[in-house]
Amino acid sequence: FQLLDVGWDACLSSDTSPTVVIDGCDSGVANVTFDNGCTLADTILACADNAPTHELFVACVSHVVHDLVDAGFLEVPDKNAIVKCACAAD
C-alpha cells in the first residue's frame, strides 16, 4: 500500500479522531495520517461512501487494512479490530 506525497492535502476535512471509529464502534486502532493528508478513518469512510451494500463495504475495508498490514503500516490485531467494527456497522 503506497501513498504518494503529492504536496497537497487530498482530504481537507479529515477525520482526526485519535482512533478509528466505525459507526460508533471504537476499534482502538490509532487513526494515522498518510502522506497525502488523509487519515485511516478517511480511507475507511471512502469505502462507506462508495460501497452500495454492507457486504461490499466490509470487503473494501478488509482489502484496505490487509494492504496496510502487508505494507507494514498495521499489525494483524489492528486489522482484525477494524474489520470487526466494519462488520458490526449498520
Image (cartoon, rainbow, N blue to C red):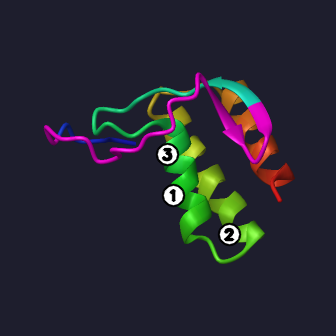
* Amino acid type, mark 3: Asp
Categorize mark 3 by other alpha carbons within 10 Å: few (<14), some (14-19), many (20+): many
- Label pair 3/2, CB-CB below 8 angstroms: no
Q: Closer to the observer: label 2 or label 1? A: 1
- Label pair 3/1, CB-CB below 8 angstroms: yes
The residue sitting at the bottom extreme is 52
Q: Position of residue 35 (x, y in %)?
A: 28, 32
The verdict on residue 10 being magenta is yes
Q: Position of residue 21 (x, y in %)?
A: 69, 37
Apparent side of residue 12 relative to residue 81 in the rendered image (left or right): left
* Amino acid type, mark 1: Ala
Residue 73 versus residue 23 in the image, above or below: above
Q: Secondary structure at mark 3?
A: helix
Q: Earlier in the sequence, mark 3 or mark 2?
A: 3
Residue 43 versus residue 71 in the image, above or below: below
Q: Which residue is mark 3?
A: 42
Q: Which residue is mark 2?
A: 56
Q: Which residue is mark 1?
A: 46
Q: Earlier in the sequence, mark 2 or mark 1?
A: 1
Q: Secondary structure at mark 2?
A: helix
Residue drawn at (62%, 61%) of the image = 48
CA gap, disc 2 to disc 1? 12 Å
